[in-house]
Structures are given as structure tokens and as C-alpha cells.
Amino acid sequence: MSSPDRSAVHDSSAGVVDSRDGAVGRGGGHLDRALLTVASVVVLGAIMSILDVTVVNVAINHLTRDFDTSLETIQWVVTGYTLALATVIPITGWAADRFGTKRLYMTSLALFAAGSLLSGLAWSAGSLIAFRVLQGLGGGMLMPLGMTILTRAAGPQRVGRVMSIIGIPMLLAPIVGPILGGWLVDDVGWRWIFFINIPVGALALVLAARILPRDRPQPHHRFDAIGLALLSPGLAALIYGLAQSSSAGGFGSSKVLVPALCGVALLVAFVWHALRIDDPLIDLRLFKNRTYAASLTMLVLFAIALFGAMLLIPLYLQGVRGESAMTTGLLLAPQGLGAMLTMPLAGLLVDRTGVGRIVVVGLTLLLAAMLALTQIQADTSYLTLSVILFVMGLGMGATMMPIMSGALQTLRRGQVARASSTLNIFQQVGASIGTAVLTVTLASALRDRLPKAPAGSESSVQNLPDAVREQLAPLMADAYGYTFWWAVALVCVAFLAAFLLPFRKPPAPVDEDAVAGEADEAPPVLAHV
């Protein structure tokens, strides 16, 4: 091999692979064509996973009626999916080492498409929830793999712009997802919100096979089976307990406390276990980095508030205002437009200034929107609601990706893969808690204000006579406003944590492995998580 070829191979181990093999260069400050080519595959997979969440949110009302079940039950279509994402993410790094990054990514795409097919064929609420969990097991690996591939390829000085690339699905999802989901539910049938993933998954598989660089399995670490046995059931039990609070009569019920406390005990045991071994599923030693720890805290609180609110708003528009799924999707578009304006700008600024300055602005906008939603009425004008959602989108775009970028900026190259997986775990756990807790809070508030109404009536009000709906709508709107106060409280706590983030651009972290001459031994795209 000639000297230039040896240089290309050496660079690939540091996150740069010869462009002739379809991989990424990391020199300079721009995002080169090789990086953007790989990013196209990563973004397509992420779009399919994230878009699915917003599409399904619009269909929740219809699924409640079609399967003749309660809101507390059908919300597990969303919660089960996000919880599956959180439980599978921890094994992503080990599986990538054991089976190869490209093979794992393609397997995840195939599993997600299979889960989508089965979800579209579901015959009951229980079967749909089960198939959504299967779908989540495939989708859970897509984001951490994509984040790690792009972040390591770009390097810490371009991480903000890379996070903006990964944020493209988050820009498109709030706009395209509700509109697409509304059209499919109203005019085609709810089953097609899942069938639509099949051609997208097939395209992503073809592109992944052609574009992603070749790699070979390089198992370096033993699988932490004990950690998985503690972490995944712990998360599941905690979320399950919280979701039972409405049907059980409150958070003090034994049906809530027993599983929730068991989940907490398992998570505490995992923390004890993870601190005693060299290669745990989650590297808790990363929390010694103050910026990383503050970012994770903010991310969880932000995800609970945001993802919970994103589920409540479609329910309000359909249950209180009587709108169709398609109209609901169109009314949600301002939120995505707001995020589209701020997310690319925030990604650029993260590479130039301290992430704390950007996040404080974003959280201020988000807090203003959440406060406005607490005052929502049955006759709130759609112009006012559009402005609120637009401001909410501005805050979302200026907060989520900067938080994740800030967490990764101060870490060494060898820490990025583990940190990426942990970030995704915390985000998905926050989303699961948000959808479960805020949905349960809403259902409880509705029953308090409508004591004679049967469970799940918030979905059936849409079919009541106008005179009856006019009497019930103000009471229902008050329940939604009350629930949004919980989201406000979470954003306020996150706002305080924002001041722990750096308000100046941190120096590039020293890559100790590269200095020691060990970079050649690292996998070319994804290190072990």
C-alpha cells in the first residue's frame, strides 16, 4: 500500500475514512460531501423513527374509539414504544462491536419495518401495544448509532453543526408528522400510519448497504448481562407504575407504589453495579463532568415536559375543539416552523459560543409558551394557539440539540459513543415518563371535572351533539390547562439547571488516546458504548 493509502487508513481510525470508501472526512471547519452523504442515510433512518411518534399522536383519539378502550390504556401505544427505545439503547455499543456497525444499523432498520407491518395488522389494543414495542426495539438503535457516527466523524469543533443535521428529523416531524398522520387517519385509515414506514425502511436499507462504510466485528468487551437485567426491568417497572396511577386512583395506591418502588430499587442496584465494573451499560463516571451531568438533567426534564405536551395538544384539538385528524395536523404546523428557524441557527452558535447562552434563551421561549397553554380555553382562537405553538417550536429548536451538543463538546473522542447512548437513553426515558404522567394527570383532571362521564369520554366528546359539547368543552379545557402547569414546573427546574452549563465556548478536549498513539486501534466509525 502506498503512503497516501496508509494515511487514509490511519485517519479512519480517528474518525476519518477515505472518501473512496464512502466515509467521512473531518478536517477543516466545513461539512464536506463525504460527511453529508453518510448523514443522508443516518437522517433517513432517524426520520422514520421520530416521525412515527408524531404521526401516532394524532391517531390516539381514533385508536381509543376503534378499539373501544380508555385513554390510559391506549397511551401505551406511545409509552410502550418510547420505553422500548430506552431499554434497547444500552446494548447498542456492545452489539455494534459484536456484530459490526453497518450490519447492526441495517438490522435495526429491518426490525423497525417489521414492527411497522405488524402494527398495521393489529387486531386489538393489546396486540398493537406489543407490536409497537417490537417496532421500538428496532428504532431504539437508529439514533445512538447515527449520533455516534456523525459526532465522531466531525470532531468536537463541528459537533453543533452535526447535531443540527441529526436535528433535521426533529424539524420535519412536528410539521410533516401530524399532517401526514391526519390525512392517513381521516382519508385512508389508521393502519397506514404504520404501513407508510415500509417503503421508507426499504429505501433506507438500500442506501445503507451502498453508502455506509464497511466494517468488521471487533468485540472488545464482555456483555454486561447483569446491568441489562437490572436497568431494563427497572425502567419498565418505574414507567408502568406511574402509568397505573390514574386507574388505581392516584400515586399513593399500591398498584402504583409497588412496581414504581421495585423499579427504583432495580435502578439503584444498577448504579451500584455500574460503579464497580469496568464496562457497564451506562458509564456513570461521565457524570463527573459537570457540563455533561447538567445537560442530562436538563434533557430529562425537557423531554418530560415537551413530549408530554406534544401528546396533549392533539388530544385538546380533537377532544375539546372537535377537529379532524387532518385539521389537527395542520394546526400543529407552526410548532415545526418555529423549530425550523431556530435549530440550524442554534447548531451554528453552539460551535462559536457557550451553549448555556443559547439554552437559556430557548428555555425562556419554551416557558412562555407553556405558561400560555395553562390559560387555554374551549374557545381560544386558532390564531392565538398558532402563535403559542410557534413560540414553543422556537424554544424547542433552541434547546434540545444545543443541550445534546453541549454534553458532547467537553468529552474526549473515546467517550463520545458511550455518552451518545446515555443521552438517548435519558431522552427516551424522559419521553416515556412525560407521555405516561401527563396523560394520567389529564385523565384524572377530566374525571374530577366530569365525574359522571365514563373513562375515555374525553375522546368520545367529539361525537356528542353540539349543545352537549358546548357545556362540557369549558370543563375539559380547564383540565388541559391544569395539566400544562405540570409541564411548566418541569421547565422551571430545567431553567435553573441551565446556569450550570458553560456560557463561553469550552476548549477542545484533549484526545488522550491519540496522544498516546492508540487511536489506530479504535474502530473506524463507532467505538464501544
Image (spheres, rainbow, N blue to C red):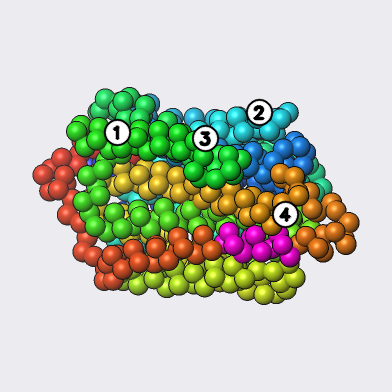
Q: Secondary structure at mark 1?
A: helix
Residue shown at 29%/33% (left/top)? 269
Instruction: State yes or no: residue 482 in magenta.
Output: yes
Ranked by sequence position, the earlier of labels 1 and 3 is: 3
Residue at x-position 31% and y-position 58%: 294
Which dot, 1 or 2, sits closer to the camera? 1
Q: Main secondary structure of the magenta part?
A: helix
Q: Residue 385 location in percent, x, y?
A: 66, 70
Tag 4 secondary structure? loop
Mark 3 or mark 2: name the one nearer the start of the chain: 2
Q: Which residue is mark 3?
A: 255
- Crowding at label 3, few (<14), some or many (≥20) Cα neighbours within 10 Å? some
Residue type at tag 3 = Lys
Between the residue at mark 2 and the residue at mark 4, the CA separation in whole angstroms equals 30 Å
* Residue 478 relative to residue 463: left or right: left
Please tell me which of labels 2 and 4 falls first in the chain.
2
Residue picked out by circle 2: 127
Task: Tell me the CA gap for discs 1 and 3.
Answer: 22 Å
| 274 in the magenta segment | no
Instruction: Verify CB contact (< 8 Å) between mark 4 and mark 3.
Output: no
Task: Say which residue label 4 marks.
Answer: 450
The mark tally for this picture is 4
Q: Which residue is mark 1?
A: 269
Residue 516 horizontal side relative to residue 221, left or right: left
- 3D distance between C-alphas at marks 1 and 4: 42 Å
